[in-house]
Image (cartoon, rainbow, N blue to C red):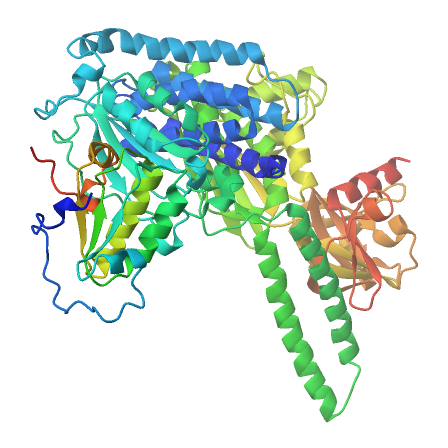
Amino acid sequence: MTVDLTQFHDAFFEESFEALDAMEAALLKLDVGSPEPELINTIFRVAHSIKGGSATFGFSEIASFTHSLETLLDELRSGTMAVTVALSDLLLKSVDVLRAMLRAVQAKQPIDAQRVSDLQFDLEVAIAKKSEPAATPAMEPMAPGPAAHDHTGTPPAIAPRWRIHFRPYRELLARGNDPLRMLRELAALGELAVRVDAQALPPLTDLNPPDCYLAWSLELPGEVAEEATRQVFEWAEGDCDLTIERLQAATPQPAPPPPLAVVAPAPRQEAPAKPEAAMSGLGDSGSIRVSVEKIDELMNTVGELVITQAMLSQLGSHFDGPEAEKLRAGLGQLERNMRELQESVMRVRMLPISFVFSRFPRMVRDLAQRLGKRIELKLTGEQTELDKTVLEKIGDPLVHLVRNCIDHGIESPEARAGAGKPAEGTVHLDACHRGGNIAVEVSDDGGGLDKERILAKARARGLVGASDSLTDSEIHELIFLPGFSTAEKTTDVSGRGVGMDVVRRNVKELGGKVELKSEPGRGSRFTITLPLTLAIVDGQSVAVGTETYIVPLISIVESMQLKATGITRLSGHSEVLSFRGDYLPIIRLHELFGVEPRSRALHEGLVVIAEGDGRRVGLFVDDLLGQQQVVIKSLETNYGHIEGVSGATILGDGSVALILDVPGLIRAASMRVAA
Amino acid sequence: MKTRKQQKPVRKRADPRPAKRRSTRRRPAAARAQGRQAAALTLAAECTVAEAESLKTGLTRLVEEVTPVTLNVGALQRIDTAGLQLLAAFVRDRRAAARAVEWRGRAPALDAAADLLGLRGMLELPAEED
């Protein structure tokens, strides 16, 4: 029975990566000195299942590495080794290496063998260090061998013992292995306590004689070498589930402890699925994995349905008479159901932001260590859900913001003490829903932005005139300019990777915005506002001539009717309007898109005040039509990129409406003015 | 080989029901041959995975036998997990139906194997005496 195992690879990788995340999180929670046993168990289970899976699939390097890791973890679990800072660093590094190995194998790339063997060596050194002082005296009193087979008394009360769980697969006997022989060999190593689990033994008439239905829970004295124990099972490897664990201060009697919680073993025919089954203990069992494409397809179909429904609704409004009433009631029902369906499908794509947040504890810990700062990371609102695509793209900007907070924001412990602050700085990551958007905040209680230095730098680079005075928010805007950095020295933290301009650009690409508030001496707060999904946008439809455009609600400040007196004509073609003490340029959409408007007189139409890139403009339109959620169809894929347009949608009457990209619109308009 | 038949009344659990001497329909020939005494099976010298099928056949014939069944192990030389597993299922199934199993003869191989696999209790083997 040859089974193509490659079909399980993807699931294995996916689950292994998830498991590693869990392991990393557990490692970070591990208290030096008094580790919580459950955390160590979690960590151990991860290493164990990755080892099992990789051995099954023939990823021998990973299996070998996880074996060393598992041995070390086993020492921690049994309490023979203490959790130290150095050890926890070593384990975190192992997580990194494992991740890299898995990635390499997944991409069918060579594994960085040097890095792996270096770390594996370190792991083995750590194991060896422990066993030298502890194991030697313990070995003396009892040499393993048949002599140890002694029925006279119970072992000493405190003696550690090996607990072996041995659950043969059905086919073990047919493959020529006999548990009886193995147990006999074990008994020769030391006094063996045996407890059989015959729960799976079927009625005699149903029993298939060559199948093995029994399982055993065994205990051996702790003096027996683990290697010798493992050797007994060497030939049965792959034909059984085997765990060998060290029990500290076991019960003095080898008598059976409380009965095993026996789970009826699953039928053996699903043997190839075993690695997943082993892994499933890590994740929640109440879920299934569905590929993103399938969900996108579903989403797309729902989008089409929404359009059809809108079309029908529009058509329905044209009818009259008693039947039409029923039709409209039905259409109303359809609309409600559509909305529910749409929301449900969208929710399928939603994941909690903890998927992104989870990488930060490790990062903050490492960075703080490297920069000699003391930092507490606070995470809140981790359960806030957002679209998977948004989630994937928000990671890098957040990393950069957090790095910035740690590098530039939080002061050194001495400086903080001098300023009367606690030596430990706080970086706070928070996520919450606000309206139809999600807001992610990164804040710190550090020194805040140094306005003087930013201004000096901007002046030095000629970005700001020597005599210009800027408001606080204008100064804050400076840091979002490409290539702007006030860091006096480039560290490996802030000197590489994306700058603040890239943060803003990435967020903007997602249809979101970044805002900054900073108070000298008190810290700064970056707020990223993002749409919940990229597939649907809340929009205001506006009419320009016969065309309809959609302005994303997130960009709209307000809409107003202009009085002829509120408009100032500047030299050239440009016009500005006075808005709350500010002058905003007016963009005539009909001019930009070459459409014949209903009216060219500004006071006869409406102006939508929109904001993008920290700039506000007035968009001149004929009329406001209504607010609606629209399904975004990519213009790039179906046509090509147009500056100022982020996509298109199909309206209820079947016509296409362009969705405006306000920042792009501002850029396009200013280019026209410049030309 | 069956000389010790009479000298082992020890475990003769009185069956509340009278032995159905007449109804021999479901009783195998071997049992019938033993007359009014309990049905019995003599285990072969080898009871390993290779012989497991035939052992199962023999045991299956007796599993629903209402009178106590005697398993004669005097000739048993070698037994493995497959053989023990069958015996364990047999004894358990009969016990569940309140039907007795008696062991006759001694087989050190069986005792040792049952101890190692932790099956002595389940097999209701008499304690090792002497």
x 51%, y 27%: residue: A55
Can residue A22 be seen from the camera position used here? yes
B6 sits left or right of A43 in the view: left
B12 sits left or right of A332 in the view: left
Corner quadrant of residue A66: top left
x 52%, y 22%: residue: A62
Quarter of the image for the C terminus of chain A: give it.
Answer: top right
Number of marks in picture? 0
* A573 relative to A359, above or below: below
The answer to which of B57 and A142 lies nearer the viewer is B57
The answer to which of B26 and A56 lies nearer the viewer is B26
The answer to which of A231 and A71 lies nearer the viewer is A231
Corner quadrant of residue B82: top left
Quarter of the image for the N terminus of chain A: give it.
Answer: top right
x 70%, y 82%: residue: A328
Can residue A614 be seen from the camera position used here? no
* A179 relative to B24, above or below: above
Picture coordinates of residue A639, whole percent (x, y): 87, 47
Corner quadrant of residue A75: top left
Picture coordinates of residue A181, whole percent (x, y): 32, 28
Picture coordinates of residue A97, whole percent (x, y): 51, 20
